[in-house]
Every structure is written in C-alpha cells, then in structure tokens.
Amino acid sequence: MSTDIERQWTSRIRHSVVDKLPPDKLLPDTQPAYVASWIYVFGVTTMAALAVVIATGCILALDGPQWWHSSTLGHYINSMHLWSVEIFFFAMVVHLWGKFSMAAWRGGRSMTWVTGAVTFLASILAGFTGYVSQTNFDSQWIATQAKDGINSTGGGAFFNVLNLGQMLMWHIVLLPIAAVVLTGLHVVMVRIRGVVPPFEDTKTEVAA
Amino acid sequence: MTKKAFRPDVDAPEYKGAYVPYDIIKEGAIAVLVVFILTAALALVFSSPDEKAVTIKTWSNADAVDFAQTAGDELAGTSAVANYGAPYNNNGTSQHWGFLSPEKWVGVRIKIDTTKDFVIDPLSAQPAQPALTAALNEWNSASSATQTTWDNAFNKAEPNLTFSNGQVRIPTKAAGPIPVLLNYETQMARSGALDQALVTQSGFYTTNYTKPLLFISDGTYFAGLADKQHLTGSQWGMMNETGQYPGQAWLWLYTFWYQVHPYSTSASGDFLVWGTMMILTALMILLPFIPGLRSIPRRLKIYRIIWREHYAAE
C-alpha cells in the first residue's frame, strides 16, 4: 500500500519539490552576512513594481481599452501604470548590472541568469505591446515605425504591430503570463541555490 | 574524491561565514508599499501623455493637399506602402544581408493592394452618384496600360495639386478619371467615412487597424506631427514618447544603431539592426557559458564595492 502511494505522481512531485526547496529555503529567516549592499534591493523592487504594474493594468482592463482617455480616474490609473513600468525597468536594469558585476551565474546558477535575461526580454515585449495598445498618437507612431524592423525579420507577417486586437491580447494575456511564470521560476532558482557568494581569489580547486 | 581545478568565473566558493536575520516577507511587503507610494506620487505630479490619435478625417481636413496627393499615390501604386514588399505585397525589394532575407522567405501574408484597398473599394461602397459611378467604370474597364498613362500624368501634375472651395484641382487633362476619383475620395475622407470604410473592410467586428495606419503613414502630415514631438528615427525614434516623458528608455541600444553608419544609410538598415540586436541578446542570455565574456566582472572588480563589508571583515 505504502509502495503504491510512494509511486504516485503526486507523491513523487511532492518529495522532489520538498527535497529541492524545503520551507526554510523557500521562506528563509536568515541570510549570509555578505548580502549587505543596496544593490540587493533592486531585485525585490522589480517584483514589487511588477505587482503594481499588474494591479493597475487590471483596473485599466475593467472597462475596456479606451475608457481612460475620457475619465480623470482612468487617466490617473494609466499614469500609475506608466510610472510603475518605468520603475520596473529601472530596477530591473540596475538588478541586471548588479548581478553581472557579481558574476551571479557562478556555482550552478547559470539557469538563474538565463531565466532572468529571458524575463527581461519578455518584459521589453510586454512594454512594447502596451505602448502600441494605447489607442492614441503614441501608439500609432510607434506601431508604424516598429513594423519595419519586425517585418525585416519575417516576424511581422505573424506578429502584426498594426493589429490592435493582436497587440492588446499579447499585452494583457500572453506576455503577463510569460513574465510572471519566468519571474516565478527565477525566484525559485534563487531560493534553491541561494545568493551567489563573493569571489575568493585564493580558491584553486573544487570538489568534483 | 577527485579534485578539479576551481574555475573562478564558473564555480563559487562554499560560504562558511556568518548568517544574519532576514525577514523576506517583511522585505517584500515594504517594497510593494514603497513602490506603490512612489508610483502614486509620480502619477500625481507628472501624469501621463495622451495625444489624440490621428484619423483620416483630421488629416484630410488639416492638410487636404497632402491627403489628396497621398491618395493619388495609393491609386497610382507609387506610395511607400504600394512598393513595400513582404508581408504586404510583392512590389518591393526585401531587406537582406547576403543570402539572408527572411522577409522574402515568409512572403505576402497581410495582402495590401493600395489601389483597390485604399481607393477603389471604399469609393465603390459609396451610394451611387453618377459622376463617381462613371469614373469608377472608366477606371475599372481601362487596360493596365491606359491606367499607367493616367497614373503618369497624375504623377507629373501632383506637385501642383491644389485644394480650394472643397475641390481638389489637378492641373492636367491627361489623368483620365483620377481627378474625379480623388475628389470623391477627399470628400469621403473629410466626412470621416473613409476611416470607417478602411476599418470595416474585414467585417462588422474588427480590432485590426492595419489598413488605415498604413494609409496615414504614407502621408507627410503624420510624420510632420511626429517630428514636432521628437519621435522620428533620427531623433532616437520610438524609444521616445510624446511630451517630455521618459518613454521606452530601455530600447536605447536598439535605437542607437539607427543613428550610426552603416545602419543609418543601408536600405536593409532594419534587418541589420535586428540582426545585431539578436546576436547581442543571445550573448547576454548565454553569458555564463561564454569564456572570456564571463570573466569581465571578475576583471572589472566592481564586486569589491558591492561586497566591500565582506572583504573588509576578512
């Protein structure tokens, strides 16, 4: 009986998850003493900004893509959406340069770097589709300019930046899902491996 | 246990030092609160831009000559969109680098025939008017050679096209039905009917603005507005935003290439910029696996500032 239970997909996945990410790693109450710089603030700031971006985006979605043009409240929420995006990218870029300076991929953390970099790309695409979904002059101009670059790669035949419906769907469904899933993966990897330790120039060998 | 050489840019030393208290939930909550307050304050102080969208109606009323000239180019098949190439039509030279030309490989998937889509079809959908019906019949029944003769006559007279008393005047008698067609097209545009006709070509429900946007982008009026808002390619283009707002500053490197040779002068500049950015992006993503590049942080030693307390305590 117990063997049957142990063979269940559910049991196997639970064991695997708990082995790799026990509760004290997922939600730690201590951290290495070397994690003592303002640069570490920008990772959590990026996630906090992402939360505000999603929250304000959800409010904008309540009454469709255009109500904010004619509503004072809508315009304010749109402004919050814009500025939270600016904070998000500022924090993310500083976070990226900080992690680059620490060579944060060391010690088996290469996929943490890769998921972070891909999240950055997904975020750029999410930001871009937002800009072309504003239904104003900005969106018209950015879309008509951007089409040439995307068309030159052949991608414009499938990802038509002049098609508001397609851009809006990518902006409010596909890319937010991608950004949140990638961010989640990235954070889980950070929690599993921990924060990369400082360089120690005297180290010459490692256990194989 | 075997030992292998420690690779400082790949391996990390095992940390055996001290641990300090850390409240991850509290940190996250404070971060969300601070970012929310900062966002709310920035939105209150700086607001956000919202320039009204350009319509064909506003364009044709603000600059009827530019509109009529553009419509004539669409009819004659001499506009930028008419000669764009893939994915809209087969009339242009595809961007390429050597034998690489994905634009050409993909081919036409969003078919745009400017003569038909931007002029003839919208006019044909208008309520029957004798002069318009006659002009459309004359155009539709003419051979392509005759249409080309009319187009050439229009192109020659186009710089001297004028608009007064609600009428487009083209100083030529050799352009066949083109003056009549452009007059009706301009009237249609100025009433707002052309906006609707271009949007609803694909049915009652639509969210696809490809046709009106391409039409508008062919005129000089639209680019003139963008120039005033410092949005053109030579002004660091689409990373900017209307007004004094920061825009998509994170696209600075993408936009940078458009400012320098050979990207700024090549007929395949877009493809070269995208190719360059794809290579740089791949390098960024795969940085941990690229010898040499992954050593840069260790050699720059910026990490000694980040971990200065750790090194000071050693």
Image (cartoon, coloured by chain):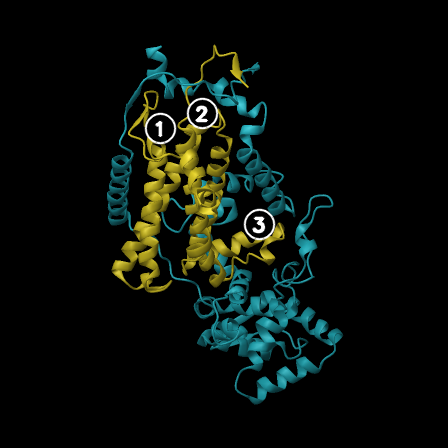
Chain colours: A yellow, B cyan
Q: Quadrant of the N terminus of chain A?
A: top left
Q: CA distance from mark 3 to mark 1?
A: 35 Å
| Badge 3 density bin: few <14, some 14–19, many ≥20, Cα 10 Å | many
Identified by mark 3, the residue type is: Gly
Q: CA distance from mark 2 to mark 1?
A: 10 Å
| Badge 1 density bin: few <14, some 14–19, many ≥20, Cα 10 Å | some
Q: Quadrant of the C terminus of chain A?
A: top right
Q: How many marks?
A: 3
Local SS, label 2 = helix
Label 2 chain ID: A
Name the residue tied to disc 1.
A39
Residue B171 shows in the view? no
Vertical placement of B132 versus B62: above or below? Answer: below
Identified by mark 2, the residue type is: Ser
Vertical placement of B78 versus B232: above or below? Answer: below
Residue B135 % position (x, y): 62, 83
Q: Give the label on residue A101, or none.
A: 2
Query: Disc 3 vs disc 1: which is toward the camera?
Result: 1
- Mark toward the start of the polypeptide (2 vs 1): 1
Q: Give the label on residue B314, or none.
A: none
Judge left or right: residue A30 versus residue B169.
left
Instruction: Mark 3 vs mark 2: tell me if same chain.
Output: yes
Identified by mark 1, the residue type is: Ile
Contact between labelled residues 2 and 3, with CB atoms less than 8 Å apart: no
Name the residue: 69% across, 54% down: B104
Name the residue tied to disc 3.
A149
